[in-house]
Image: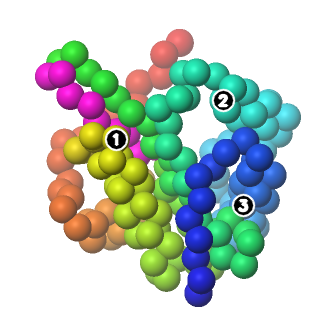
């Protein structure tokens, strides 16, 4: 399989929407709907300076997105460090176990390293397949426990 990794830019939103729809055809448990509000928020994110430190990559096979990874930079006064947060990594089910996620992660790590980021932090999905993947990532270890706090 010939894979190409490309940065996710505003002109690729339609490719990502196609990816999102194909994800749902193979597995329909995603926690959000692809509606007007979602599309509008994604479009606006590319013009919002708050997203300047975000890195999003797409894996293409046969000119279709088959995988995606999204991250953002975290700068903390706690210890004066800059880290990155892995917000999302997903591969179309029919393309899993073929190296797509690993290539996306390696590509992201290269970009982060070139930007002086030495640590990538991720909340891991609780499903067994995701846990196996994360445990197989070189130079990584499972630490701590993640928590989601909704701000209301």
Discs 1/3, front: 1
Observer able to see residue 80: yes
- Which quadrant of the figure contains the N terminus? bottom right
Q: In the image, is 142 to the left or to the right of 122?
A: left
First-in-chain label (2 vs 3): 3
- In the picture, the disc for residue 45 is 2
* Cβ–Cβ under 8 Å for marks 2 and 3: no
Q: Which element is circle 1 on?
A: loop
Estimate the x, y position of residue 8 in percent, counting from the top left.
Answer: 63, 49
Residue that appears at 48% across and 16% down: 151
**Identity of the residue furthest to the front in this view:** 114
The verdict on residue 83 being magenta is yes
In the image, residue 28 sits, relative to residue 149, either above or below, namely below
**Which residue lies under the disc numbered 3?**
19
Q: CA distance from mark 1 to mark 3?
A: 28 Å
In which image quadrant can residue 74 be found? top left
- In the picture, the disc for residue 115 is 1
Residue that appears at 72% across and 42% down: 10
Q: CA distance from mark 1 to mark 2?
A: 21 Å
Tag 3: Cα neighbours inside 10 Å, few (<14), some, or many (≥20)? many
Question: Which stretch is magenta?
Answer: 79-87
First-in-chain label (1 vs 2): 2
Estimate the x, y position of residue 69 in percent, counting from the top left.
Answer: 51, 54
Our reading of the magenta stretch's main secondary structure is strand
């Amino acid at each position: 399989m010939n894979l190409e990794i490309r940065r996710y830019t505003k002109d690729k939103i339609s490719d990502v929407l196609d990816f999102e729809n194909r994800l749902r055809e193979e597995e329909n448990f995603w926690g959000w709907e692809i509606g007007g509000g979602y599309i509008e928020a994604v479009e606006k994110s590319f013009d919002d300076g708050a997203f300047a430190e975000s890195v999003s990559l797409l894996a293409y096979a046969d000119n279709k997105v088959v995988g995606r990874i999204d991250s953002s930079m975290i700068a903390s006064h706690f210890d004066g460090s800059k880290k990155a947060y892995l917000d999302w990594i997903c591969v179309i089910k029919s393309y899993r176990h073929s190296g797509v996620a690993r290539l996306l992660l390696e590509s992201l790590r290269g970009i982060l390293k070139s930007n002086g980021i030495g640590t990538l932090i991720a909340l891991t999905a609780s499903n067994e397949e995701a846990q196996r993947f994360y445990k197989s990532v070189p130079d990584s270890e499972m630490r701590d426990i993640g928590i989601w706090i909704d701000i209301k």
